[in-house]
Image (tube, helix red, strand yellow):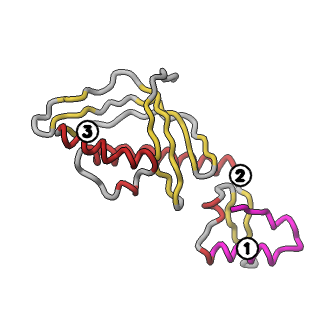
Amino acid sequence: MSVHNVGMDRRLPTFGLSLALVFGLAGCSAAEDNPSVAPTTSAADGTVATTLAPSTTTVFDESAAVLRAYTDHWPAFDAFLSGRPPGDPAAYFTGARLADLPRSVADFAERGIEIRGQATLSPGKVTIIGNKATFSDCQLDSTTAVSRTTGEVVIPAATEPMLVKVELLKFGGVWKVSSVVYTDEKCVQ
C-alpha cells in the first residue's frame, strides 16, 4: 500500500481525515503496513492525521520485534523436536522452516531423542525490506540431544559458534521464522 503525506497540502484536510477513517474502519493500520507511519490524534479538535515517525525509532522497534520472534521460536522448535508441540507449527514458522519441521520431528521421534538446554544466540544487524527480515546469527548450539529412555547424550553440544543465515516473514503483523541455514563460514565476533 502506498501512503502519501496528505497533511502537507493544506487544501486537503478533509481528504486526510477521510483517509484515516477509512484505514480505521477497514481494520488496516498505516503503521502496520508501513512502519514509518504513525497515526496521531489532536485532542484539541479531535482530528486524526497520519504523520511520518522518525525512521530510526521504527526500524529499531521493528528490528527488536524480529529478534524477539527469532529468539522465541527456538524453545518452540526444540519442543516440537522433543515431541511436546506447543501448538500449531504455523503459529511459529513459515516457508522452508515450516516445511522441514515434519521431517525433523519424525527423525527425532524415530531415534527416540529430545532436546535439552538452549542455544546461545548472537544475532547481527537486521535488514528489513517490506515484510522480509534477514540477518546472520553467530550461534553456539549448546543444546544436546539425549535419549528419551536413558538420558544418554546422543548428539553433544557444539564447541564452536556457527554462522547461521536467518530469514523471517511478516504475516498479519506477526514475524515468523521462514529459514534457518547453518553455514560453514566462521563467525566474526
Q: Nearer the viewer, residue 54 or 157?
A: 157
Cα–Cα gap, marks 3 and 2: 42 Å
Image location (x, y in percent) of residue 128: 61, 45
Instruction: Please state the extent of the stretch shown in magenta in the rendering.
Output: 1-24
Q: Main secondary structure of the magenta part?
A: helix
User: Which residue is denoted by mark 1 in the rendering?
Assistant: 19
Locate residue 104 relative to residue 92 in the image: left or right. Answer: left
Q: Is residue 154 magenta?
A: no
The residue lying at 24 percent from left, 34 percent from top is 145
Q: Amino acid at mark 1?
A: Leu
Mark toward the start of the polypeptide (3 vs 2): 2
Q: Nearer the viewer, residue 178 or 5?
A: 178
Q: Nearer the viewer, residue 36 or 33?
A: 33
User: Which residue is denoted by mark 3 in the rendering?
Assistant: 115
Q: Amino acid at mark 3?
A: Ile
User: Which residue is denoted by mark 2 in the rendering?
Assistant: 54
Q: Nearer the viewer, residue 42 or 108?
A: 108
Q: Amino acid at mark 2?
A: Pro
Q: Secondary structure at mark 3?
A: strand
The nearer-to-camera label among 3 and 2 is 3
